[in-house]
Amino acid sequence: YSMLNITGFVKIAKKFDQVVPMQAGKYKSALEARNMMNDAQDVEILSAKYETYYANWFCEGDKRAAKVQMLSKRGDGLELDWSQLQLGYRMGMCAVLAIWVCWDCIWGLVGNGYSTIGSRAAFPIFRACGGLLLLQWFWGCSVFIWTRYRVNYIFLFDLIPSTVSTPFNIFTQAVNNTLIFMLLMLLYYKSGAQDMPHFIPPGGYPLILIMVTMLKLVFPRRQRNPMWHTIFKVVLAPWFSPNFFQTYVGDILTSMVKIFQDITWSICWVIAGDFMASDESKHPSFHWSKTHWYRNILIPVVMMMPLVFRFNQCLRKFSETGDRFPHLANATKYALSILVTLFGTFHPLYLEYVGKNSINKNGLQSFYQIFWTFLFVVSSLYSFTWDVYMDWGLGDKKHGFLNQFLMYPRKSYYYLSITIDLILRFLWVLTLVPPYSGASFALPEYLNALSMMLELFRRTLWGFLRLENEHRNTATRFHDHRTEFVPLHFKSGHQHHYEEKKERIGTEVLQEVIMVAIIVGIFCFATVVAAQHANHFVTKERDL
């Protein structure tokens, strides 16, 4: 109960510092450990004694590893219930649909010489919605990891506990959305391949996906309103003082550059009414996507806007604190990334200028490419260095280039994360190069989906360590350098109705399983009958 009281008082003090900045730090002395609980020396001595025992017996004297293993993990004692069964078999359905879609792509590539889905007219729509869906999956993974290793993301983000979804609920929503996504993609493929009757035009399926995605982004409003409120403040960063959660969201937006490009394409596709057009062409082209305003103005602006938002947040923090470091140094990181995009935007114009002026043509073009490549490398290395030293708080030579206090159990996790971040940082900067820049190192079109997935994966990995570092810093500020502890989140009463619903959920799951089994059986029977009918028809034609 004493820790619960501390949690409430710390949150009240933080809110007071935000609302009344003129009196910030008024209650700082009251937050010191000796004033809150008289230091709890007896408990700490007893705890250190048993940590030493455990370290000597099971961890070869490594006290840090002993602390990590002795801390109970959320989710270790979960009992299997009907809701988990429901999630499991729905994930199985998603896996089957995913294999089906991949098989059709491979079969189309082998049989027809082109990817039957990847080269379709509306594939950027599925790529955009798939990126948002993947982001939902990664968010569920992030919440699960933070919860399991006691990184108090709710406290650090200043979220309202009653509106926060558990990892299980996030995964359940992601599974349901994935089923809709895979089903519409499969119907779109089958309709375009003439494998099913045209109940609606082929372009109707991606249009339905857009409408479903929009609904999912708005409802349930109780959970979506805080998200849109945060994004609104990120976009208007010069006028709002950014908190930690808003800067975190701003960083996520910088990793969604490819998704924003496809969203822009999808909006133009809907406005132009191309969903009613024929989808029979293997390599469709849309007149609006080849115009100057789309290629050289709209797309570069869309690519730079997330970087500009984050750049403005850094400038706002500098104007409030007056600290050149780290705020101006962080703003420089985003300025370099913006320059990479600007050089890509003006590269086609530069090539046109060099083509008209043959004087020293090779020298001018070589200088432009060399400087652009140099800027690309500097931006990548600068961003990587900032990730490791500033965002993650690693790089201490005394502790193996890591940190004294680590919350994840193995040091190899940190070294692996550093290696992956170094490689994928270069890939992230590549995503900032406009697709029509003509750069020799630009990513080809067929790798856009892969680069988008890898960047979202890198950002998720970055988030694990970023929250850990913020956890350490917050513990240092509010608990007198007791870096092992930040107040844990206590569940609220709105989650206590779970046991009452378990029996009813079990009946619903059984009904759903039986219904799905019947539908699958009917579908299999109809497929066999159709195949036999087609075989009989082919045999009859051969006899004639």
Image: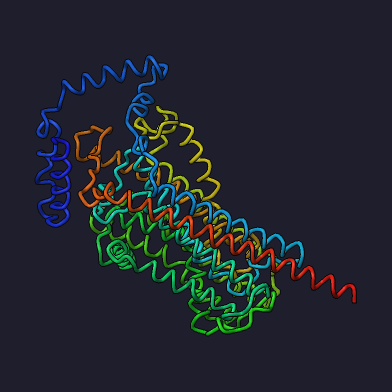
Say above or below: 89 vs 200: above
The residue at the point 28 percent across, 49 percent down is 498
Left or right: where 374 falls relative to 157: right
Q: Quadrant of residue 394?
A: top left
Quadrant where the N terminus is found in the figure: top left
Quadrant where the C terminus is found in the figure: bottom right
The residue at the point 25 percent across, 35 percent down is 485
Say above or below: 231 vs 389: below
Q: Nearer the viewer, residue 356 or 128?
A: 128
* Residue 192 place in picture, x, y as percent: 65, 74
Query: Which colouring convention does the figure follow?
Result: rainbow
Q: Nearer the viewer, residue 83 or 200?
A: 83
Left or right: where 51 falls relative to 26: right
* Residue 475 place in picture, x, y as percent: 25, 38
Q: Quadrant of residue 466?
A: top left
Q: Which residue lies most toward the right here? A: 544
Asked whether residue 237 appears in the rendered view, the answer is no
Asked whether residue 133 appears in the rendered view, the answer is yes
* Residue 64 place in picture, x, y as percent: 36, 25
Q: Nearer the viewer, residue 183 or 364?
A: 183
Say above or below: 399 vs 517: above
Q: How many marks?
A: 0
Q: Nearer the viewer, residue 266 or 504?
A: 504
* Residue 363 place in picture, x, y as percent: 67, 64
Left or right: where 508 falls relative to 528: left
